């Protein structure tokens, strides 16, 4: 498809408004959260990379998923800007910037410059995107590789230069190495080829470029047991329908569109000036690419009874969602109505996503401030700290290994340079775990008058058991503040302690 055949229909006012809104969104929802506290999943990224590239494979075997690539990326970022949240997350921010560029370039080829600009503005307004940019996890990097594959195939279709297919093949392998569940992105690229490329004889080479990544995915599925994620309830049909709209922007945008004069929704299905038949088919491709990933995640969740119906697991749907909604937004006329829709969507989305606080925290775990509070208020460095990390791996029989000095659960204290007398708690109140833990708890209560309790959550089977255990022995918990979802209490003997 020749992008030069598509006329640019942007004027200076529109570009300046979109640029200003996008800059505000990126600053508020992408840059500022980079300085928020790490959350539990990011500990693993830091832990695997904490001893440098030579130890990443050994440390990575601690966890149920392969995280070596993102740990290497996080380690490289910290070599540039130091051991801090920004450095560890830098690769996700850079990946998000590449995603914006790719979404614009692909949208311009398929739907024109105005729709591409609207799509680029809408993409960072999605809640799932906001949650992953300032996050040292796999999803934004995987998104960048997915869009790189899609863009490379698009450039090969335009120019027939073979190195674009080589780039697509390499990025496809990196996509699978980054996160296995994001392999659905390769399926979406294959769908793009089969859906729109004519004649069919041009299918073979771009499809062949996807084979190495698909082969890697097949090997991982066959050689490694998949984790049984059953800590979330099974989704309902209502949950699935809600997931089709990338909140908060989509629901708001639909309301805006319904109220604007001159909307003409029917025009979305008709041709526009200069649009080829292939471009017309792309509208239906991106609609399918929006709907298929959540549909697949929903189906696998129900069929396998495992909780993968989570936005980050069908993350590859969101560029298509941006293209669909951007194409609708671009057709609002006249410009003043389109400008009103752009501004209202951006401002309202920012308010909903980040709130009014000065430090947006998309992951809602403030371990840094909780640890600083202990540092400031403890009277003796030897005061014990009961620590419930929340790591799923601490539900295994070898759960104590995770709490050993230098272990995965201690890594958050290493990151924030804090020393303490820690007593690790298992993930659940399994009888075998409780039998191992109780003697140490009894000895601690008998020899100390002040004990700290630090936990990822205030509730859960383990915390409910611990609260009952302490209350039965006359100990009282005094909350030391709110740190998002992190619980911090000071435990002291009560007046009725037996």
Image (spheres, rainbow, N blue to C red):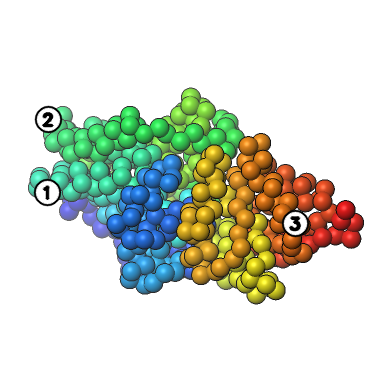
**N-term-proximal mark, 1 vs 2:** 1
Classify 10 Å Cα crowding around label 3: few (below 14), some (14-19), many (20 and above): some
Residue corresponding to mark 1: 163
Question: Which residue matches tag 2?
Answer: 201
Residue at label 3?
445
Quarter of image, res 493? bottom right
Of the pair 315 and 86, the residue shown nearer to us: 86
Distance from Cα at disc 1 to Cα at disc 2: 19 Å
- In the rendering, at what x and y percent does residue 116 appear? 33, 54
The vertical placement of 484 against 223, above or below, is: below
Task: Name the residue located 16 percent from the left edge and 29 percent from the top edge.
Answer: 200
Per the model, the C-alpha gap separating discs 3 and 1 is: 66 Å
- Judge by depth and name the residue closer to the eye, 161 or 41: 41
Instruction: Report the Cα–Cα distance between label 3 and label 2.
Output: 75 Å
Residue at point 26%, 58% (across, down): 8
* Comparing labels 3 and 2, the label whose residue is closer to the camera: 3
Which secondary structure, mark 1? helix
**Picture residue at 33% right of the left edge, 55% below the top:** 55
Q: How would you rate the neighbour count of disc 1 (Cα within 10 Å): few for under 14, some for 14-19, many for 20 or more?
A: few
């Amino acid at each position: 498809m020749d992008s030069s055949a598509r006329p640019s229909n942007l004027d200076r006012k529109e570009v300046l408004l979109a640029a200003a809104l996008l800059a505000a969104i990126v600053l508020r929802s992408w840059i500022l959260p980079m300085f928020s506290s790490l959350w539990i999943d990011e500990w693993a990224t830091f832990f695997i990379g904490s001893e440098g590239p030579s130890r990443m494979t050994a440390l990575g075997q601690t966890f149920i998923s392969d995280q070596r690539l993102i740990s290497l990326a996080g380690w490289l970022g910290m070599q540039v800007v130091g051991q801090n949240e920004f450095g560890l997350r830098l690769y996700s921010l850079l990946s998000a910037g590449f995603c914006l560029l790719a979404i614009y370039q692909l949208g311009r080829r398929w739907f024109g410059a105005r729709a591409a600009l609207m799509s680029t503005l809408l993409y960072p307004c999605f809640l799932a995107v906001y949650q992953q940019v300032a996050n040292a996890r796999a999803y934004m990097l995987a998104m960048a590789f997915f869009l790189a594959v899609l863009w490379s195939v698009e450039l090969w279709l335009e120019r027939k230069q073979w190195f674009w297919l080589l780039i697509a093949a390499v990025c496809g392998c990196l996509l699978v190495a980054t996160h296995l569940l994001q392999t659905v992105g390769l399926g979406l690229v294959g769908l793009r080829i089969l859906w729109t490329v004519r004649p069919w004889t041009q299918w073979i080479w771009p499809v062949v470029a996807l084979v190495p990544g698909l082969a890697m995915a097949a090997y991982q599925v066959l050689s490694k047991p998949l984790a049984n994620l059953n800590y979330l309830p099974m989704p309902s049909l209502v949950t699935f329908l809600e997931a089709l709209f990338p909140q908060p922007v989509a629901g708001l945008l639909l309301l805006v569109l319904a109220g604007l004069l001159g909307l003409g929704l029917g025009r979305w299905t008709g041709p526009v000036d200069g649009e080829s038949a292939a471009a017309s088919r792309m509208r239906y491709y991106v609609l399918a690419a929006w709907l298929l990933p959540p549909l697949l995640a929903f189906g696998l969740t129900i069929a396998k009874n495992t909780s993968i119906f989570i936005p980050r697991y069908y993350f590859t749907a969101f560029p298509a969602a941006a293209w669909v909604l951007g194409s609708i937004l671009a057709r609002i006329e006249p410009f003043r109505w389109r400008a009103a829709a752009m501004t209202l969507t951006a401002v309202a989305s920012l308010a909903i996503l980040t709130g009014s606080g000065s430090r947006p925290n998309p992951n809602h775990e403030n371990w840094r401030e909780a640890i600083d509070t202990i540092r400031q208020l403890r009277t003796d460095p030897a005061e014990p700290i009961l620590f419930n990390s929340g790591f799923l791996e601490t539900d295994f029989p070898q759960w104590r290994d995770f709490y050993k000095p230098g272990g995965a659960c201690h890594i958050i204290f290493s990151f924030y340079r804090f020393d303490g007398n820690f007593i690790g708690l298992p993930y659940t109140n399994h009888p075998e775990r409780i039998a191992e833990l109780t003697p140490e708890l009894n000895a601690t209560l008998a020899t100390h008058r002040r004990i700290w309790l630090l936990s990822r959550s205030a509730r859960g089977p383990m915390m409910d058991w611990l609260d009952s255990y302490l209350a039965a022995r006359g100990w009282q918990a005094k909350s030391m503040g709110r740190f998002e979802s992190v619980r911090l209490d000071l435990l002291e003997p009560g007046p009725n302690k037996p």
